[in-house]
Amino acid sequence: MAGTWFHLTSSFLIVCYVIGFLISTVVAENHQRPPTVVPLSLSSRNHSLHRHVDNLRRRLFQSKLSGSTPNARLRLYDDLLSNGYHTARLRIGSPPQEFALIVDTGSTVTYVPCSSCSHCGNHQLEIKRTGSSLRILFLVRIQDSRFQPEMSSTYQPVKCNPSCNCDDEQKQCTYHRRYAEMSSSSGVLGEDLVSFGNESELMPQRAVFGCENVETGDLYNQRADGIMGLGRGRLSIMDQLVDKGVIGDSFSLCYGGMDVDGGAMVLGKITPPPDMVFSHSDPFRSPYYNIEMKEIHVAGKRLELPDGAFDGRHGTVLDSGTTYAYFRRDAFAAFRDAILSAVHFLKRIPGPDPNYNDICFTGAGRDVSQLPKIFPQVEMVFNNGKKLLLSPENYLFRHSKASGAYCLGIFPNSESTTLLGGIVVRNTLVTYDRSNDRIGFLNTNCSELWRRVQFSGAPAPTPLVSPSKDTKMEIPSVLSPSGSPSNVLPGSFHVGFITFDMSISTTDSNLKSILKELTELISEELEVDNSQVRLLNVTSQEKDYLVRWGIFPAEPANYISNTIARSIILRLRDHRIQLPERFGNYKLMEWNAEPQRKLYGHRGNIAF
């Protein structure tokens, strides 16, 4: 967590595409910056490892603290008790290289194994899919993947500068994250295009990430490729996207239930449903996401605890990298006793691991939907009086060795901090509204949500360009490959012209003599008339040339049609321009879509 909490092993990524739900109940608040939905998947590990990892994270957490617009839709694959964390698939580079990353609200760096890694494990995921009609189990193994910077035409190293730690050669920025004894990740920082899948409304964006050269401890053994950091910090993927203005300062997570995969991650703002309950979150009190929990009710009765039982120095902390929940000792004892009193008729049995004194019950049956008839309802009460209902699956986990048996997923914490892991927010949409310093909760069936969208013919995401004959075009805020905000303006406007910069490495000393032919090739690749492509500027940079092109409306029109503009933008974005070998290598540096202006007169001013 933020470089201090420990992450472990295999993470299963299922990106839950919840566009139908978002359209009907959580429509994007700012249409100029719709959220991005990223599929998540829950990986599993055994109970003993869960507890071991949670303990390490809590110890490191306490040690650390005592010393110190479009949206992306990603589907979640969750199996919390099998592997213990959720993952999402991100694609990095041009062409894209895909990675399964642990989604962690407590980490501030996103990193993947690098092709140059001298000590990285073999990260593989086994994805289990059950046939919808024949109930057949399919097992798909995804081979180990490492990011290859040399294979990406858009990759750039983050050069050494005063604001970062540098490598031994003082050429490139580095990062280092230590999570526990013998568990760490270190490497160099790079920048490249990051894409969030075909379902996402957010176009690929340039972002800084860690290219891992060494990993140790449990990080070495995990199946997931790396970490997707959603915490607060300048290297966090959230902070980078927000700082560039492409999404609102908010994200949401929706985890599936006890036995069913499913869920979603939404990067960007959504309009909260009317029945979502919020708690204040104080970013100055703790570097981690926290809420203000006042008390807990079990079976309608308030636990008899002193004031501030859940209000330690850093409040009540939410962490997606932790599996279970941890209360301070007196709060845990009160909660345990209340549950035991409510289910006194159930038989107690030993837990799955003799190393832990788990509180487990048998006789409740295997049907999770029937648990509310046996186990009591629990409510978390916030300082503002709002209440969040917890069903039994939010505080129980299934016994791994006894059929129809369950154990408490709430444990005592030797410190005063209250820590809420993924178990507490099963089947709950959690919105981290950072711009308003609050966190919202909505009870919902995340898995059914995914299935409803997949099979009910829910509306597709809004396209980049409307297919209608309307002459106006919806283009969200977009970043060019350079990483600087481009001049693509949000909202509806007519596209007046498109510019893009191309770096060309060629052995031909007289580039000027082949520019006419190059112009014709560009027009063919973009499928526009030759008269629409104009050379605006050429600058010599040693053996390279920086060439700026302009794509203008075909006469007599004064704007580019939606269809053509969309085609051009997608070709530039996806790097589909192919040039003959005699022109050498090229790299697309930047592109901009300019709105229609009353007057424009770029006529191609060549300068060497």
Image: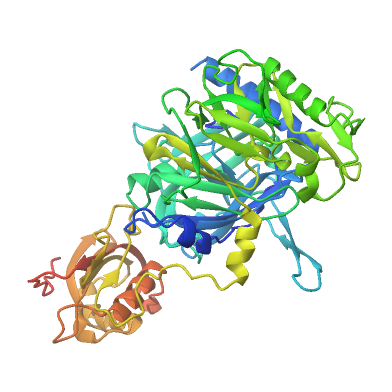
| 76 versus 556 height, above or below | above
Which part of the image, by quadrant, shows the C terminus? Answer: bottom left
Where in the figure is residue 348, as x and y percent of width and height? Answer: 91, 30
Where in the figure is residue 504, as x and y percent of width and height? Answer: 31, 67
| 607 versus 393 height, above or below | below
Which of the 4 image quarters holds residue 81?
Answer: top right
Q: Does residue 460 appear left or right of residue 418 in this picture?
A: left
Which of the 4 image quarters holds residue 304?
Answer: top right
Which part of the image, by quadrant, shows the N terminus? Answer: top right
Q: Residue at x 65, y 56 (%)?
A: 447
Front residue of 474/539: it is: 474
Q: Tell me if residue 258 can be seen.
A: yes
Q: Residue at x 38, y 37 (%)?
A: 436
Q: Residue at x 45, y 48 (%)?
A: 272
Q: Does residue 266 appear left or right of residue 319 in this picture?
A: left
Outermost residue toward the top in this view: 306
Q: Tell me if residue 194 can be seen.
A: no
Front residue of 510/266: it is: 266
Instruction: Please tell me how many numbered marks the rendered image carries.
Output: 0
